Amino acid sequence: MKLKKQHYNEKGGGFADFFPMRHKKKIFELAEIKPSDVLYDLGCGDGSILIFAVKEFKVKYAIGYETDYTRNFIARKKVEKAGLGNKISIINEDFSKIDLSKADVIFDMLPEMEGDLEKYLNKKIKSGARLIKHDLPLIAYLPDCVDIPFYRMKFPLIKAKNRTQWASKVLGIKNARVNDVWHELYYYGKEKDYSKWNIYRFERMLDERLRTN
């Protein structure tokens, strides 16, 4: 049996697409994606998610943002080869400058950084738009539907009342502790190589956001 090759970024980015077919299907079923939807993929890698969405779920249009030059180039070539240039755009642009006002579904699997929340709160994203996150929902905010390791969040976003509520939603168990979330993340995160520094950063972001009304 000949296995498919995946583009690997030796500079630390890992695989451009490490989701198997069954996870791609899970992503879009969780998103309740429809043929009338416009999909945005923030950090689209080699474009596989976009192509899958158009071919299998017939989305109206798909837009991928990828700032890594090699991956952006490969994504463009894959879209061209699939004959989907009229349905998919691959863009090299800073995420902070992206206009998300026309998005129905946003897929963002990148680990959250400080300032990412403002990317969503200040972008005039329409009510009912769905954000799909991987590994964690937005720190301190509640998903409305979960199929671990994927989390769906609908706009407008809803903030957790406390640490226990947020951790319980993330893990899907009652009265969970935030430390349990970090433990699961640290040992689960092989693809993204979560470090103790990431955990300290997430902890700080959680406390800061829960303190803010």
Image (cartoon, rainbow, N blue to C red):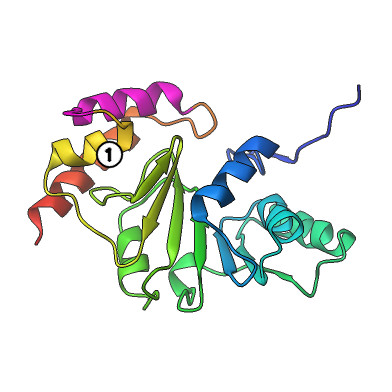
Count every numbered label the image shows and give the total.
1
Q: Is residue 67 left or right of residue 81?
A: left
Q: Is residue 132 magenta?
A: no
Q: Compared to 30, does 63 lie above or below?
A: below
- Give whichever of 160, 90 is nearer the camera: 160
Tell me which corner region of the image, top left, top right, bottom left or bottom right, holds residue 159: bottom left
**Residue type indicated by callout 1:** Lys
Task: Report crowding for label 1: few under 14, some 14 to 19, many 20 or more residues within 10 A (C-alpha).
Answer: many
Q: Residue at x 63, y 68 (%)?
A: 63
Residue 47 seen anywhere in this rendered image of the structure: no
Screen quadrant of the C terminus: bottom left
Q: Residue at x 26, y 52 (%)?
A: 141
Of the pair 13 and 212, the residue shown nearer to us? 212
Where residue 184 appears, as percent x and y from the top left, is: 35, 24
Magenta segment range? 174-189
Residue carrying label 1: 169
